[in-house]
Amino acid sequence: MHLIPDDPRIVDAEQNGYPEADVVMCPVCGKTCDTIYEDKYGDVCGCENCMMKHDAYEWAEENEEENQ
């Protein structure tokens, strides 16, 4: 009799425990996160792990120097 092997996610859960129910994974980077960021069209563009925050004035100043 041939046994069908379990899905790798089932094997992982059996070996490492089931993930917490309230853990959210970022659809972009796959890391656990607390905040998901969307663009103005509602498309997910990242989380606090894979997005960078910049001061708008500093960013504009840095990019102005690059464009001259």
Image (cartoon, helix red, strand yellow):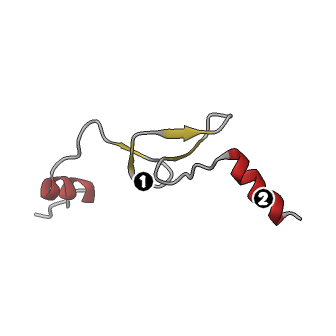
Question: Where 13 falls versus 21 (above or below)?
Answer: below
| Element on which disc 2 rests | helix
Residue that label 2 marks: 63
Q: In percent of the image, x 62 and y 50: which residue is there?
A: 54
Task: Specify whether 40 is left or right of 49.
Answer: right
Dot 1 falls on a residue whose secondary structure is loop
**Quadrant occupied by the N terminus:** bottom left
**In this picture, is 58 found above or below 65?**
above
Q: Residues within 10 Å of mark 1 (few under 14, many from 20)?
A: few
Q: Amino acid at mark 2?
A: Asn
Residue 47 % position (x, y): 49, 46
Q: Amino acid at mark 1?
A: Gly
Q: Quadrant of the C terminus?
A: bottom right
Q: Is residue 31 left or right of residue 40?
A: left
* The disc label shown at residue 64, or none: none
Q: Give the total number of marks visible in the rendering.
A: 2
Residue 19 x/y as whole percent? 23, 46
Please give the label number shown on residue 30.
1
Q: Relative to 46, is 16 above or below?
A: below
The residue lying at 70 percent from left, 45 percent from top is 56
